[in-house]
Amino acid sequence: GIPFQDGYSCLHAPSLFGPELPTAAGPPFTLFIDKTTGSFLCTATLAEGGWQDLQAAVELRHRGVPAPGPEEGEHEEEEAEARRAREDARRIWERALPLGELLDEEETQTTKAAFGIAPLADSTLKRFGVRYLRAAKALVFPWFAPRDAALRGLKLLVAERQGDAVSYTEETFPRFDAYRNLFGLPLIGRRDTEVVLTGRELDALALHQATGVPCLALPRGATILPPALLPYLEQFRRVTLWLGDDLRSWEAAKLFARKLNPKRCSLVQPGDLQPKPLEALNRGLNLTKILRAALPAGHKAIVSFRQLREEVFGELANSEQVAGVKWARFPELNKLLKGHRRGELTVFTGPTGSGKTTFISEYALDLCTQGVCTLWGSFEINNIRLAKIMLTQFATRRLEDQLELYDEWADRFEDLPLYFMTFHGQQNIKLAAQDFIIGAFRKFATDNTCHITLVIHPRKEDDEKELQTASIFGSAKASQEADNVLILQDRKLTTGPGKRYLQVSKNRFDGDVGVFPLEFSKASLTFSSYGKSKAKLKKVKEEKVPSPKKGPNGGMGGSGKP
């Protein structure tokens, strides 16, 4: 009995959190319900929750009981942390100055040059509320609430020159996982029907100055479009995604277009003449012309080579990016698999007790620390134990012995784009069902351009024999559908007894297969040399005599950070 309208990615309905039950002739539709997940956000009251929370709110209203407000039911600890973050943001904001109010024009120009934003006018920076914090040498981007323009948080951006290039580091208040600012949203008018989404605040500034079109920057770069932001994008009939200048940004843009509804989305394809908006402005390129050349995101089931031509060229010109995200902890794996690629299915197996879960958690953690959004479905060990393993691997030390460091490492770990399914417990399934599930995973990976890694037990075989691709439990379906097959061998191979090895027995990307040794560190629960090199460095530093003795390079021995 609730009136609603069908939107692009959300259903629109009157708020359930006002004083009266919604009616067709009632207040504007400010309740947005995600058509995929069922989660909701009321932009009038900022109440949000999942589908079950919405059902509960509807039942309460029909009984005449007011639905809970946005902060009711929140954990006091979380609310206290949010208040502290807002207070920290307020203090920083008050100390920061608009760039046009620095001591003199020379300081303003020097600051702009350091950030690579010399073409940006003071009026553009002022319009978007950008400030400069001298103490940290950082640009400050505000997060204003759309409802009442109150300061909810901010992002600090520090620039570092590397030759002609500029690299940036970011810090947000509140922490990254709770920072959901669509930078530029307060400048959007109710009648605006077109918007450009960028991956960085500086790109949004450059694009708006050059074209005058409404521009918004995603809060966490080109890797994540939080579903909670979708309601704020419902008013736009046309959304152009110009996220970056690399293949990863292009893949992300195609995924985001599916979230936003491809029929209204266009994509700016990365290329030498279509770099990031700020770089395009610095190079004097025509940004309006680039926007007009954006490709429609919608596609048909059958395409010709003419439609694929540019993407084929892009893959040839960016072969390193096409190979995927490189492992930082497992360089030998990069030599064989070349990288971790979207749209692939990896099957991983190994003997019982060989350390499959421990290895695959470090394998996933490596990618997660590089920004690869990761969802864990652990059916054999519970999430608390799994998180403990990964936190130990992340810190590369036994935190049981250094509990005073727990909060520091837990805070850093919490910022990773890492999530856990709540399902737990084994299920007995027939072979036909297993084949169906593997086929479903294969289709899901392809359709959603994500990488799925399945851990499958081996068949019961002679303990003296090494495992092979045919050792994977079930029919041949798993190895046939997989793009990659990895086997953790716990056997004596050609070099050294008693060690474990990782074997790549299938690699559909370029065919390279092979094997390399692994050495397990019990202290850090790692198979890579990453944990061992850190532990060795720590041990060496502890043994050094704290004297100002010069090192071989003229530096102070034992004074550098690991």
Image (tube, rainbow, N blue to C red):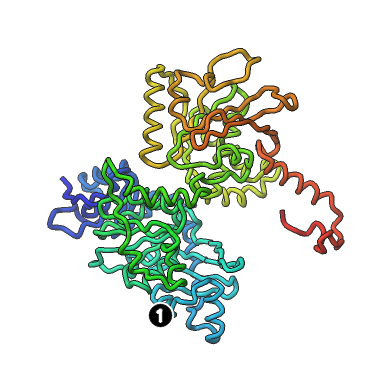
Q: Is residue 58 above or below residue 283?
A: above
Q: Residue at x 25, y 66 (%)?
A: 192
Q: Nearer the viewer, residue 374 or 271?
A: 271
Q: Is residue 284 above or below residue 533?
A: below
Report the residue at 40% width, 61% height from top.
198
Residue 56 visible in the snapshot: no
User: Of residues 73 and 399, which is closer to you in this image?
Assistant: 399
Question: In this rendering, does residue 409 appear at all?
Answer: yes
In the image, what residue type sits under mark 1? Ser
408 left or right of 401? left
Looking at the image, the residue that sits furthest to the left is: 25
Position above or below: 186 against 424: below
- Label 1: which secondary element: helix
- The residue depicted at 27 percent of the width and 63 percent of the height is 194
Given the current orientation, which residue lies at the most extreme top position?
462
Q: Relative to 441, say whether 415 is above or below.
A: below
Residue neighbourhood size for the residue with mark 1, other residues' Cα within 10 Å, grouped as few (<14), some (14–19), many (≥20):
few
Q: Position of residue 34 (x, y in %)?
A: 29, 47
> Count of labels shown?
1
* Residue 293 point in image, percent of width and height: 32, 61
Q: What residue would you read off at disc 1?
A: 123
